Amino acid sequence: MSEITITFPDGRQKAYAINSTAMDIAMDISEGLARNVLAAKVNGEVWDATRPITQDAELALLTWRDKEGQSTFWHSSAHLLAEALEALYPGVKFGIGPSIDRGFYYDVDTGDRSLSTEDLPKIEQKMLELARNKSVYERREVTKADAIAYFEEKGDEYKLELLDGLDDGSITFYQQGDFVDLCRGPHIPNTGPIKAVKLLNVAGAYWRGDETRAQMTRIYGVSFPKKKELDEHLALLEEAKKRDHRKLGAELELFMFSEKVGAGLPIWLPKGTAIRQRLEDFMKAEQLKRGYTPVITPHIGKKDLYVTSGHYEKYGEDSFQPITTPREGEEFYLKPMNCPHHCEIYGHRPKSYKDLPIRIAEFGTVYRYEQSGELHGLTRVRGFTQDDAHIFCTPDQVKGEFLDVLDLTMHVVKKLGFENFTAQISLRDPKNKEKYIGSDEDWEKAEAAIIEATQEVGLETVTELGEAAFYGPKLDFMIQDALGRSWQLGTIQVDYNLPKRFELEYIGADNEAHRPVMIHRAPFGSMERFIGVLIEHCAGKFPLWLTPEQYSILTISDKYLDYAKELKTELDSLGLRGILDQRAEKIGRKIRDAEVKKIPFMLIVGEEEASAQKVSVRRQGEGDKGSMTAEEFAKMVEEMS
RNA sequence: GCCAGUGUAGCUCAGUUGGCCAGAGCAGCUGAUUUGUAAUCAGCGGGUCGGGGGUUCGAAUCCCUCCACUGGCUCCA
C-alpha cells in the first residue's frame, strides 16, 4: 500500500505515492497550475494543499477561480492581518477571524488603545511586508492541554473560551511567521500570493454576537492575488457609493429627512411622491384584478387591540410608548402593523363560507421604534407604508390563495426589473420556541402550506431557522442592493394564530362555526424600503412608466419658446409628462443639467425643428437619436415603457 | 442601544500648534448675452461653524453633554 488512487473532477484517475499532497499532484500536472493552487477539495472537504493524502480520494485543486479557493485565501489573509496586528500592537488579544462573502475580518481586543481608520494604512503596509516573507502556513495538531497552556501563557481569554467548546483530539494550530492561531483551517500554502490588501473599515462587534458581552474591534479587509483585481474591486465599491439611494434621493430631490421632524421619518418630496404614487397605482390595479377589497384604518389603536394580537406582550416595551387621552388616561399605540385592525374588519359581521376568501388591502402606514443605530436611509426607518393585505380563507383555500399571492409577487418583482432575488422560507427557531405564540400543530400546518406551495411552482428557496415572525412562518423575498447587501422586501405569511386570538369565525356548509386562516402579504413590503432598493438598482434612472419627468424640452433660444409651448401641449395630450426649460442658457448647459437630473429624454427645439414641426431627441446617457414628430416620439416612449 | 468616526452657506469642501471682520466653487437672486447636443459673463445676497454648557484675555479649533449622520455589532411584528 505505497500508492493511492486519486480521482479528478473529470473522472480521470491516477496513482500517486501515499502521503502525496495536493501540491505534489498539481506539480505533476503542471508547474503553472501548482503556482496557482490555493487549497484542495479532498473527498468534498476543503484541505490545505500541503496536507498529505493518506488514502484513495477524489481530488479537486482549488485556485482563485473557485469560491472555496477565494475563501481560503481570505481566511489566510485574516491570519496575516492578525500577524501584522501582533507585530504592531504587542499584547493584542484575538477573537475570531473568518472569511466573509467578499473579504475577511478579524475581531480583536486592543485593551486601552483604540484603533481607527487612520491606523489601517500602517497595518496594510505591515501585512504586505509580512506577506513578502512567503511564510508557510504550518498546520499542527495539538492536545487540548497544550493548547490551553499556550493561550494561558499568552493571556488570550477569547481563544481559551473557544477552546472550551472543542474536543481534545480535534484541535489544530496554524502558524505563519511568529503568529500562532487556534484554527481548523484550511489555509493557502504560504503568504506569498497575498499581493494586494485593503483594510476597509473598523467597527465594533460584540464577542460571540452577544450584546451583553465585551465589545471588540472588528477590522474588515479584502485581499487579492493581483493589484489589478483589488483596483477593480475598489472601483466597484465606488460605483456602489454613487448609486447609494441616500445620495441619489437627495440629488434627485425624491425625499428628505429633517432633524426637527425626527430621525428615521422620511419626508417624500414631489418627485419621490410621483414615483411612489405610480407604484401604488400599479399595485392597486393589480389587486383590483385579483379580487382585493381596499379599506382604510386609523393610524392608532387602543392598547387592548395589541394585547389581543400579542404584539403588546412581544413589543410593548420596544415600541413607541402610548399616547394617552388627557381626561380618561386611555392608552393608544401607533400601529406597528395593520393586521389587528384588519382582523376587526373581518369580525365586523358574521361570515359565511360563501364570503371567503376575503382579501382586505390597505396601503397602511405603520410606526415602529427602531434602535437609533439601526436607522438607515429609506431601508430602515421608524415610519413606513406597507402595501399590506390580509386574506381570510378556509383551510382548503390556503394553497390556492398562497399560489395567487406568489404569482402576484413574482409579477411585481419582474415588472420592476429585479432578476436576482432569493425566496427564503423563514421558520421558527426550534431551540427557542418560547419566542413564538401558537400551538405546534398550527405552526406545522402553516410551514407545510408554504413549503408545498413553493414546491408546486418550482420556486427555488433557501430555508432559515429563527427568521419567522412571532405569530407564523414567512416566505420572504430577499433582493440585493448595489452594495451587495441583501434586503427583505416582499413577504407572505401564513397565520393560524391571529384568527384564534381575535376569535374570528365563519359558518361552514355544515352550519358549524369554523376558524379561518389568515395570509399576510406585502409584495413591495415597505414602499420606503422598496423604493430605496429600486433607486440603487436602477441608479436613479427609473423605468419610463415610473419616472417623474419623462422629457425636458430645451430651446436653442427663446425665439422658439412659442413652438416649445405648443409642443408641450401636444405631448400633454399624448399622455406624456415633462417640463420645459425656458432659461436663457446655452443649449449645452441645458443638456448638462437635464443629464445630471437623469431626465430620460431631452427634446431640443430650434430653427430646424420649428420649421419642420419636429423635435430632436436626445436620450439621457446615450446621445442624439435624430429628429421626429411629437407623435413619433410618443410612440417611441410607449414602446420603450 | 453598543463601539469607532463625522457635523463649517441649499450642495461639495478649505480653514489642521486657539488670535485680524469665517473663505472658495456650484446652486440662488439681478443684469447682460439669444446661443445647435454635458457648465456664457458680471454683480449681489447668504453661515448664532449641529444645539447647549465649560476652559481661556480670546474658541469653528480644547473639554463635557445632547442631537443628527456614517461604518459595523445587536435588534427588526
Image: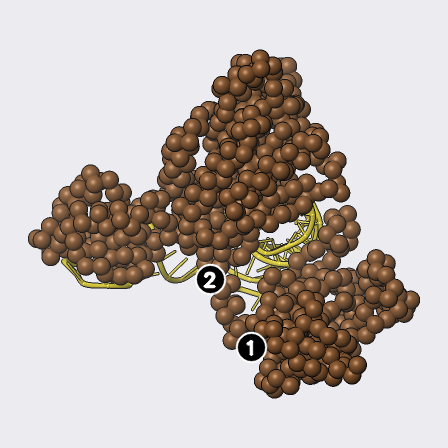
Task: Report which quarter residue A47 is drawn in.
Answer: bottom right
Question: Is residue A437 shown to the viewer in this render?
Answer: no
Mark 1 vs mark 2: in front:
1
Q: Say if labels 1 and 2 share a chain.
A: yes
Q: Which residue is mark 1?
A: A226
Depth check, front residue: A142 or A52 = A52
* Residue depicted at 64% across the width and 23% down the height: A500
Q: Which residue is mark 2?
A: A239
Query: Splitting the image into 4 quarters, where does residue A205 fall?
Result: bottom right
Compared to A283, does A542 lie above or below? Answer: below
Disc 2 residue type (three-letter): Glu
- In percent of the image, x 53 and y 57: which residue is there? A484
**In this picture, residue A583 sits left or right of residue A341:** left
* Number of residues whose C-alpha sits closer than 10 Å to that of mark 2, classed few (under 14), some (14–19) or many (20 or more): some
Residue at mark 1: chain: A
In this image, A415 relative to A169: left or right? Answer: left
Q: Numbered disc 2: what chain?
A: A
Q: Position of residue A377 (x, y in %)?
A: 52, 47
Query: Which is more N-terminal, label 2 or label 1?
Result: 1
Dot 2 lies on which element? helix
* Chain (yellow): B
Chain A color in figure: brown
Q: Residues within 10 Å of mark 1 (few under 14, many from 20)?
A: few
> Viewed as shown, does residue A492 lie left or right of A108?
left
Relative depth, front residue between A313 and A90: A313
Inter-mark Cα distance, 1 to 2: 20 Å
Marking on residue A511 = none
Position of residue A109 measured from the top left corner of the image (x, y, whole percent): 76, 62
